[in-house]
Amino acid sequence: MKRSLFLTFLAAGLAVMSLSARAQQRTLEPDQNPRARESAGKYSRMIDSLTSNQGATVQNTYKAYDWYEAREARRQERRAYNAVYFNSGYYSDYGFGSSLFYPAYGRGYYNNFGGAYFAPTFRIGGRGNRFYH
Amino acid sequence: MQLKKTVAIAVFAVSALAISSCSRQVTRINPDQAVDISGNWNNTDSRMVAQELTTNILNAAWLNNHTQQAGKKPVVVVGMVQNKSHEHIEAETFIKDLEQSFLQTQRIGLVQGGKKREELRGEKADQQTNASVSTMKKFGLESGADFILQGSINSIVDSHKRQKVVYYQVNLELTNIQTNEVVWIGDKKIAKYVKN
């Protein structure tokens, strides 16, 4: 009795296993990877993030160097700096202070020669150096 | 008397000039007209890209190949377009022209993707509880796309002093969703010489 019961359960178990294997084989296309379900499961969890940009333009722009624009930017920066400096109160109206336009003045390189009367229109380091001798 | 009149005319002329110089002038132009102002990407570039790529994609071999093999017209979903150029460019301006051509020629089917598809599914979900049974739309009956259209925009800028050459390359590619096989690649190259 016990043996026949055991055999019956064994047969039933084998039948279920073979049916499930056949069912799995039926869902696979010919030549389809048998582990396709793993991939489907993995990507099913990410559907929203993977498809949210469909039909949209993702902006990954870069900053291109433009000589002309860079020069304009430098000029703007210098003007802004000078405007702040000359309005700050640190600048006393003799000599050139520490203007970015004459960056060497007011930093120990130029003694002002008695004030703005001799304010030169030359660049330090150029021909103007003769005034120091 | 004569002097007064002259002064009045002069004052009027000067004020008219001042008013006109301060006012903004707007003139409507034909969208097909090419007007280059800054040298940046503009509507003319977008239109050129749309024209070139539309002609290219509709006349390529993939379309007939698919129709013959599958016995029905291909269904396409528009994927992501990546702008890797130096300017802000919206690809939608030329992608929409492309989609429009698909529908006008009736040779390519189109399905919604991304946020618009999410909205559609949201509407469907809403109908499940609010619409009458006879008008309610069911889940799980969407058309699956056969192909996905993806793209990229790249640029190269070469500038020195007041001169600049800007080069744009727009690439679109169509890929079979089932096999990942790229069936079509189209590009449009635009180069501009800008002198400031």
Image: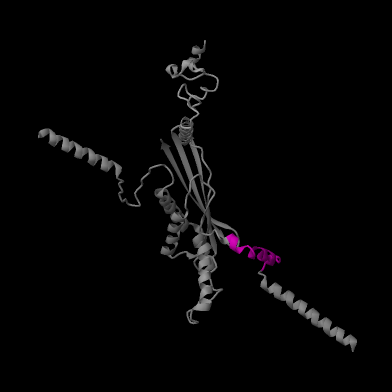
Look at the image and tell me whether residue B74 can be seen.
Answer: no
Residue in the foreground of this view, choosing between B177 and A126: A126
Image: A22 above or below B78: below
Image: B10 above or below B24: above
Residue in the foreground of this view, choosing between B5 and B178: B5
Total numbered circles: 0
Q: Identify the image quadrant of the N terminus of chain A.
A: bottom right
Q: Residue furthest left?
A: B1
Look at the image and tell me whether residue B80 can be seen.
Answer: yes
Residue in the picture at 48% in, 15% down: A113
Residue in the picture at 67% in, 63% down: A42
Q: Main secondary structure of the magenta part?
A: helix
Residue in the foreground of this view, choosing between B126 and B49: B126
The magenta stretch spans residue A38:
yes
Residue in the foreground of this view, choosing between B108 and B69: B108
The magenta stretch spans residue B135:
no
Relative image position of residue A56 (x, y in whole percent): 51, 57
Q: Residue furthest top?
A: A133
Image: A118 above or below A54: above
Q: Which residues are magenta?
A: A30-50
Q: Residue furthest right?
A: A2
Image: A63 above or below A90: below
Relative image position of residue B3 (x, y in whole percent): 12, 33
